[in-house]
Structures are given as structure tokens and as C-alpha cells.
Amino acid sequence: MGSTSATAHGLKRPLIFLGPPGAGKGTQAKELARHFGVPHLSTGDMFREHVERDTELGRRARPIMERGELVPDEIVLGMVEERISRPDCAAGFVFDGFPRTIPQAERLGAILAGRGFAAPLVLYVDVDYEKLFRRLAGRRTCKVGGEIYNIYDRPPRVPDRCDHDGGELIQRPDDREEVIRERLAAYETQTRPLVDYYRAKSLLREVDGSPDAAAVTRTLLDLVKRDS
Ligand code: AP5
């Protein structure tokens, strides 16, 4: 069972990062999860792990992700439900890239309530499209620990090597221009409606994701601490 009590650093409810591809959800979700000492749950990372391990789920998700479309809700929900039932999630967690459709959000609401968690706080990070393209084209990710860099704005100290563990930095296959366009289209039609969905429930907080990453982190932390 989950708990509504605060973690050592005071996270009282699950956090959800919502926003377009490249807005900085992963970058910020990792920082906040570290700060609050709770798991960072990225459905994109989970799928990429399945693809890497060539599991049955990975074989289903791979072509969908390569086209920039969304993986069907029932697959995502099964994976998330299993993940948050593990003991490390008992004191809370930070979702990154989930939920992404109204049915996912509705089901998540029921799962959280059923496990005794408080209603989530939804951090909506928005950035204009021109910046998103530059961020996605320049993104590099550590193959070992998943740390996120950008060759233009957040370069590693040593080219192509992670500052933390020296792992190789790779480019995601869905960061090609034509796939980025599809991902943005999927975001507009299927995910953006969640902004109004959560706003109507007074669970949404909007944050400008265009300043540098450290400044965005400070804004987010202030906001979460005020809300907790
Ligand atoms: P996913 O991995 O979730 O990708 P996404 O939502 O498209 O988001 P990104 O990871 O591309 O961007 P981000 O906002 O995390 O930005 P980041 O921090 O990396 O999903 C991939 C695929 O999996 C989907 O297309 C779908 O097929 C499937 N999927 C996943 N979840 C699903 C779900 N729930 N339902 C159905 N299908 C699902 O930053 C980007 C770059 O910008 C980096 O280089 C970073 O260093 C840089 N940057 C970040 N912040 C700043 C800043 N403030 N200033 C300058 N640069 C910055």
C-alpha cells in the first residue's frame, strides 16, 4: 500500500510531468525525484529498456515508438501498475511522460486512490516549438545511467561521455526530424487535452520550461514545496 505521509524531504503526493516532447520533463523529473528521494518513473525509459532487452513488450512497442505514435493504453497501464506496486514506490514517485491520454489519466486516478495516495500534482512544462526541435536534435543520453545532455545547451565535460559514470552518450532513434513531427502531432491530439483535464480538477501547475535547466528546477521545487 502507498502512503500519504511526507518523505524525508517532504513530498506529500505523486508528481506528474506533463508537456511536449523535449520540454525538459525527463531532465526535471530526475532532479525532483533525486531531491525527494523517490523513484523517477519514465514510461518512455521503461519502453526503451524493453526494446533494448528485446522482450515481447519491447517488440510490440518498438515500431510504434519509431513512428512517433503512442503505445496503446492497456500496455502502458499494465506496465505502470506493476511498477508502482513495488516497495520502492510506497513513499511516492515522479511520473515522466505518463499519463498521456485521458483514459490513462482516468485509470491512474483510480489506481492512486485505490493504493491510498493523495491526488497527484501535475507539473505542466511548456516550451515553444522552435526550441523543442533544437533540444531534441541536440539531445544525447547516457547508455548506462540515462543522464540527459544536450550538445548545444548542456554538453558533457568530455564529448560523448557521461559526467557521472563515463557511459557512452547516444542519440535516440526517435529524435530524427520526421519522427519528432509525428511525436508533436500525437502530443497535440492525444496528450494536450490533459492540460484542461487536470486544470479542471485544480491539480495543474504551469511552468515556463524555456529558462536554463537549473532555473526551471528552482521554480519547480518552490512550487512543489508550496503545494506540499
Ligand atoms: P518519452 O521518452 O516520454 O518522450 P517524450 O515525451 O517525447 O519526451 P522526451 O523524452 O523526448 O522529452 P523530455 O520532455 O523528457 O525532454 P528532456 O528532459 O529529455 O516517450 C517516447 C515514446 O514512448 C513516445 O513517443 C511513445 O511512443 C512511448 N510512450 C512513452 N510513454 C507513453 C505513454 N504514457 N503512453 C503511450 N506511449 C508512451 O530534454 C530534451 C533535451 O533538452 C535534452 O537534450 C536536455 O538536455 C535539453 N534540455 C532540457 N531542459 C532544458 C533547458 N531548460 N534548457 C536547455 N536545454 C534543456
Image (spheres, rainbow, N blue to C red):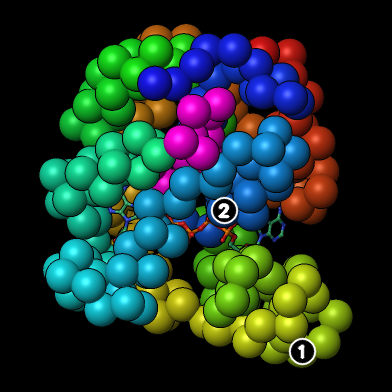
Residue 210, image x and y in percent? Answer: 69, 48
- Give me the residue at 35% from left, 35% from top: 85
Q: Residues within 10 Å of mark 2 (few under 14, many from 20)?
A: many
**Left or right: 104 as drawn, with respect to 173:** left
| Marked residue nearer the N-terminal end (1 or 2) | 2
Asked where in the image residue 199 lies, by quadrant, the reply is top left
Which residue in the protein does label 1 denote? 159
Relative height, residue 150 to residue 213 (above, below):
below
Q: What is the three-letter code of the residue carrying label 1?
A: Pro
Q: Is residue 124 visible?
A: no
Query: Magenta stretch?
Result: 87-100
Residue type highlighted by circle 2: Gly
Q: Does the residue labelled 2 lie within 8 Å of ligand 1?
A: yes
Residue 104, percent across and down?
Answer: 24, 34
**Residue topped by disc 2:** 26
103 with respect to 148 (left or right): left
